[in-house]
Amino acid sequence: MSAGNRRVFARGAVVVRQGETAETVHLLGEGNVKINVVRADGADSLIGLRGPGEPLGELSAYSGLPRTATASATGGPCVTHVLTGERFRLLVTDMGLERLLWQHVVRRQQENEALKADLIAMAPRRRLAEVLLRLSAPGAGAGAPARVLPVMQRELVGAVGRSRSWIQEEFKRLRDAGVISTGRELVVIHDAEGLLRLACEEVPE
């Protein structure tokens, strides 16, 4: 971390943007970022969350290709340590990390593809439950909820493949059942098993 300049991003601020070819890598020191991708049809889809210790923009800086996703601070501010692309490539080479870097990139891609394949085969309610569980993080501290997902409801539209009104109705059903609660840019999962159980109660399309 000492190799980079410290930057603070307010909640919602973009750290790296899809399509850019900026020569920087951000090492996430504090806070969380959400990862969104704009698909070919124009839909904005949430594909993941990243926490402290994760690099952002490393593939673009190393390969010279445009960034493949947008990362923005979520749940509060985040702190990154910024390396120039030249400095990042030098560190990777000097430390012999080329193989590990590409393994990291391929693993992320495989995880994204596996998630998409799994979700396509699921009924809508199960798809919503899986997105909430896979993208959320465990709660921290005594008495903390099972899992927390700092996200707005509209950002789940692309990931789940359903309308915003459908997601709002499902959230109401899940809140009434006591398995989740929601706030501003926040979904709290109190009962993961209950969420999956209710997800099996599909209704006719």
Image (cartoon, rainbow, N blue to C red):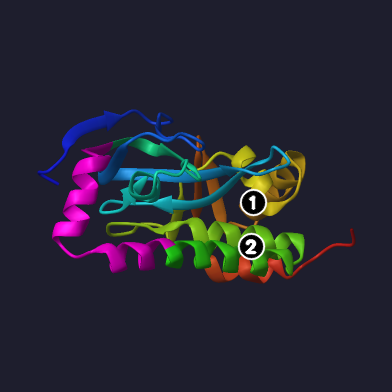
Say if mark 1 contacts mark 2, CB within 8 Å. no
The range drawn in magenta is: 79-105
Residue at image position (57%, 44%) is 37
Residue that mark 2 sits on: 116
Q: Nearer the viewer, mark 1 or mark 2?
A: 2
Q: How many labels were placed on the picture?
A: 2
Residue that mark 1 sits on: 159
Q: Is residue 101 magenta?
A: yes
Considering the numbered disc 2 on the image, is that residue within a helix, a strand or a loop? helix
Q: Amino acid at mark 2?
A: Lys
Could you give the CA–CA distance between mark 1 and mark 2, rounded to whole angstroms?
9 Å
The residue carrying pointer 1 sits among few (fewer than 14), some (14 to 19) or many (20 or more) residues within 10 Å by Cα, namely: many
**Residue nearest the viewer, comparing 150 with 145:** 150
Q: Amino acid at mark 1?
A: Ala
The disc label shown at residue 74, or none: none
Q: Is residue 186 magenta?
A: no
